[in-house]
Amino acid sequence: MGMKWLKSTDCVAFDVRDNVARITLNRPDKRNALSARTIQELNQALLEADDRRDVNAILLSGAGRDFCAGYDLTDSYGGAADLSSDYDADRYRTRAGTLDDDIWNLERQQELTLIMLDLHKPIVAKIQGNCLAGGTDLAFSCDIVLAADDARIGFPAARANGTPPTNLWFYHCGPQWAKRMLFTGDTISGIDAARIGLVLEAYPADAIDAEADEMVRRIACVDAEILATHKRVMNMQMELAGARLSQRYAAELDARAHLSQGPRRSQFRKDMAEKGLKEALTNRDAPFGNSRVALRARKPSA
């Protein structure tokens, strides 16, 4: 059950209007990067929306310029530091521990975000600006993804940090495009993401808000019980194609990637420790040059 709140929290804004719950990542100064607190508060907001009788649909968005720039790498690779308390830390697992410790931590985090697949009510993601790394974990767990034409979508961390711990790329754009994006860590614009099926549709930046509002308005005209039947039967078909099981496998493989002793992974860890996040990201991405996918073959216009 949800928290039965009627207010926003430190990291997430929550509002219900016209049978739509609007959940907004609300750390614009941090480009809505995902700390542990943000993920926990998002989980509670989603459960709250699913519990409310006056909600038929959910709109997930990000405040400010970006949807979500990824996990908060300055905060212990996802934010355990902001939840510190008076306890004996040596008694508990850390991501810097064993392989199984890392898998365990990733699975516990995954439980908080994969709830989006289990909610009875449909979720529409509205993407503007950056939707990177952990931002894609969130967006692609939604039922429908809408993007601004100039949005920047990708998983650059695939270059040296690991594989997406929540990996639904295959189910949105198919194996070749999923591999192409993850093998390089390149990014793709919203408009080209729509062309390859990674998002449902893209719109001019000044129109994305109105288009997303109209989409959730239309969805919310349908009774919640009917919407739940549509969502759950579609998701069952994805599960029969292995979608849910593959998420546990993705978390385990991400943990294995974290143990890589390859030069790029080792250099990133060294740069983080000695020079900070900005320098680490610059050095990681420098060999790739222009990292934006540029489509040559395009779908014919209608």
Image (cartoon, helix red, strand yellow):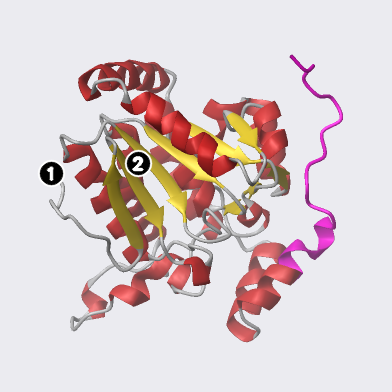
Q: Quadrant of residue 82?
A: bottom left
Q: Which mark is residue 1?
A: 1
Queried whether the magenta region covers residue 117, the answer comes back as no
Q: Is 25 displayed left or right of 14 in the figure?
A: right
x and y percent of residue 52 in the render? 17, 39
x and y percent of residue 133 in the render? 56, 53
Disc tally is 2
- Give the secondary structure at mark 2: loop
Tag 2 residue: 114
Q: Which residues are magenta?
A: 283-302
Q: Quadrant of residue 129?
A: bottom right
Q: Are marks 1 and 2 in contact (CB under 8 Å)?
A: no
User: On the rendered image, what quadrant is the C terminus found in?
Assistant: top right
- In this view, the residue in front, 74 or 194, is 194
- In this view, the residue in front, 218 or 184, is 218
User: On the rendered image, what quadrant is the N terminus found in?
Assistant: top left
